[in-house]
Amino acid sequence: MATVVEPLTNRPLTELPAWKDLEVHFQKIRELHLRQLFAADPERGERLTAEAAGIYVDFSKNRITDQTIELLLQLAHESGLRARIDAMFRGDKINSTENRAVLHTALRAPRGTSILVDGRNVVAEVHEVLERMGEFSNRVRTGAWKGHTGKRIRNIVNIGIGGSDLGPVMAYEALKHYSERTITFRFVSNIDGTDFAEAVRDLDPAETLFIVSSKTFTTLETMTNAQTARAWSLNDLGGDENAVARHFVAVSTNAAEVSKFGIDTANMFGFWDWVGGRYSMDSAIGLSTMLAIGPDNFRSLLEGFHKMDEHFRTAPFECNLPVLMGLLTVWNTNFLGAETVAVLPYEQYLKRFPAYLQQLTMESNGKHVTLSGTEVGYQTGPIYWGEPGTNGQHSFYQLIHQGTRLIPCDFIAFGQTLNPLGQHHDILLANVFAQAEALAFGKTREQVKAEGTPDWLVPHRVFEGNRPSNTILSDRLTPEALGKLVALYEHSVFTQGTLWGIDSFDQWGVELGKVLAKRIIPELDSKEEGKLEHDSSTNTLIRRYRKYKEDSAQ
Ligand code: G6Q
């Protein structure tokens, strides 16, 4: 039975014995260079690695020793990570500020297993929805599902934002190799009308199906875009309201609002309040993914997630990939003072993966108070960002190599390419290995001088090195591999959040701006000057905008 979970320990993180030991330890090793660490220990690059579920993580190029890992593992134990993992998988209400269970792991639990939330077996419900999604996807993909005029669907547009967009976009791009190429997929998220206009400009409404993806079905951006899509469809389909049911389906938890919109609730795919938006790409929010890659591939994606879930749930911490990655992020953030993590996939299909991770990591761990509401006395979630390699090398890598900041990097690569073309893949992989090597070991003044570099140029050509990185390798980007990779980061984020003692599953920080925007919307239309009661900057900006509007109306 799900219960509300109290914070595991009221002892602040920085008061735990292992934290104190880490502080002392850090002072001892802070000056050590990766050059020394590797030179003194020829086995380091084999030993400081871990492999599970077909994912290999080399973390040897972090500024750590074996003792660092031991102390971080001790910190994980003292922080109650084991109990917290068990509570999450059990369905306890660990999202305490919203009084919700956190059960994205149930979305990929195998048929026949059981997880109870408020007395209901949610796994059975998950599989019912998956069945319905599968039937629907097959109908659309085979052309059995027809539009209002009898034409088959050739275009699918997902309308959603945040967690109802970033996962679907990322997964569509990541798994494009496996996608049905006769169907065009588009994604509309932004309230900026340009997003919708450009997404549909070359589409025929008679062949276009919209998936309105919104957990709440009240999100301003999504509902505005959905209404615009409705008008766009009906305008071309003779204004017949019955057309809505053939051209719109919904993914939501809010049947009443879905119905009000005119979507047949038979074509609504549900999920549950225990699935957070940024943890929902493997729920019905993944309908566009399933339509693109087919139900069998979607099930492989879920299997990948599940394999990593099982690894996270059962593996001892010392060989547990998400735990190790999470602990290293805590080390880099709280001891080395890193403010960011660069995620650098050397795989073109993962081009939206950094954007996806930005939400997963920063909405989850961008918190300044602990579960008990007290201000944290340390940094929490770092800034995640990145671009696919090798493009970044010709752009921002300069700062990572020679700038004044410490930027830990996660390099991600696959042994086999999905598009074998000449030497491309060898060159790509040579680059990823070379970047991690250059960041760790750099190039000394002596080496630069020995190359005959004039003295005045030497400082410019020195690479300090000692920049930490992880290298994450897998054999091939398949739906299953993607599931494992996403789950690896989900659980690493959870590990970090647990150590920091924060609620990684709420997002109160997005509320204020939404409320203020709702107040400003009617003011942008108002002709009555005297009514603006914001600060002088906001008032002036609103007045200036009104003037632009007036000018364009003339
Ligand atoms: C994610 C957040 C947020 C959410 C969007 C869309 O964890 O909750 O990004 O996904 O605000 O919400 P709806 O799906 O309700 O439209």
Image (cartoon, grey):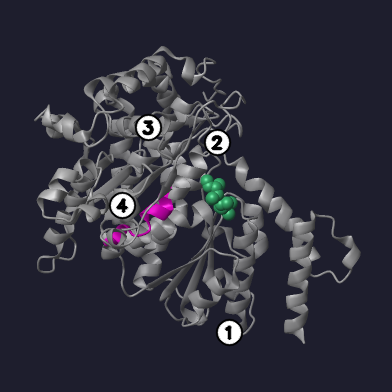
Amino acid marked by disc 1: Asp
Residue nearer the viewer, 305 or 351 = 351
Question: Looking at the image, is mark 4 or mark 1 nearer the viewer?
Answer: 4
Q: Secondary structure at mark 2?
A: loop
Local crowd at mark 4 within 10 Å, few (<14), some, or many (≥20)? Answer: many
Q: Earlier in the sequence, mark 4 or mark 1?
A: 1
Amino acid marked by disc 4: Leu
Q: Which percent across, then down, holds residue 467?
A: 28, 41
Q: Earlier in the sequence, mark 2 or mark 3?
A: 3
Q: Secondary structure at mark 1?
A: helix
Amino acid marked by disc 2: Lys
Q: Which residue is denoted by mark 3 in the rendering?
A: 336
Q: Which residues are magenta?
A: 348-357
Instruction: Find residue 537 and name its label.
Output: none
Residue sitting at 53 percent across and 32 percent down?
503
Q: Which residue is denoted by mark 2 in the rendering?
A: 367
Q: Which residue is denoted by mark 1 in the rendering?
A: 236
Quarter that holds the C terminus: bottom right
Residue sitting at 33 percent across and 75 percent down?
182
Q: Are marks 3 and 1 in contact (CB under 8 Å)?
A: no
Amino acid marked by disc 3: Leu
**Magenta residues, dominant SS class:** helix
Asked if ligand 1 lies within 8 A of label 2, the reply is: no
Residue nearer the viewer, 542 or 34 = 34
Q: Which residue is denoted by mark 4 in the rendering?
A: 344
Asked if ligand 1 lies within 8 A of label 3, the reply is: no
Q: Secondary structure at mark 4?
A: strand
Q: Earlier in the sequence, mark 4 or mark 3?
A: 3
Left-right relation of 366 to 154: right
Q: Which percent across, then down, holds residue 297?
A: 29, 55
Residue sitting at 41 percent across and 12 percent down?
17
